[in-house]
Image (cartoon, rainbow, N blue to C red):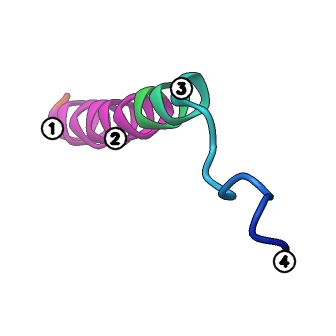
Amino acid sequence: MLWSEPPDEPPEELRRAEAMLRRARTVLAVSVLLAMCLLSMWP
């Protein structure tokens, strides 16, 4: 690696998109678990 090369960090847009995907994945997982619990209690 040369000293003149830029650092290997992703751009700000990519980091924001990854953070949004992580939040969406968490919300989706919690909502699926909640839906399964509600459906299992349904008579």
Whole-angstrom CA distance, mark 1 to mark 4, is: 59 Å
In the picture as drawn, the residue positioned furthest to the bottom comes out as: 1
Name the N-terminal-most of marks 1 and 2. 2
Q: Which residue is mark 3?
A: 17
Task: Identify which residue, 2 or 7, lies in the foreground.
Answer: 2
Q: Which residue is mark 4?
A: 1
* Residue 3 visible in rendering: yes
Region in magenta: 21-41
Q: Which residue is mark 2?
A: 26
Name the N-terminal-most of marks 3 and 1. 3
Name the N-terminal-most of marks 3 and 2. 3
* Residue 43 visible in rendering: no
Q: Which residue is mark 1?
A: 41
Q: Which mark is in front, 1 or 2?
A: 2
At x 43% / y 26%, what residue is drawn? Answer: 20
Principal SS element in the magenta part? helix
Q: Is residue 3 above or below residue 19?
A: below
Whole-angstrom CA distance, mark 4 to mark 3, is: 28 Å
Name the N-terminal-most of marks 4 and 2. 4
Q: Which mark is in front, 4 or 2?
A: 4
Sort mark 4 into few (<14), some (14-19) or many (20+) by Cα contacts within 10 Å.
few
Residue 13: image tag = none
- What kind of element bears circle 2? helix
Whole-angstrom CA distance, mark 4 to mark 2, is: 37 Å
Name the N-terminal-most of marks 4 and 3. 4
Q: Position of residue 11 (x, y in %)?
A: 61, 33
Whole-angstrom CA distance, mark 3 to mark 2, is: 14 Å
Identify the image quadrant of the N terminus. Answer: bottom right
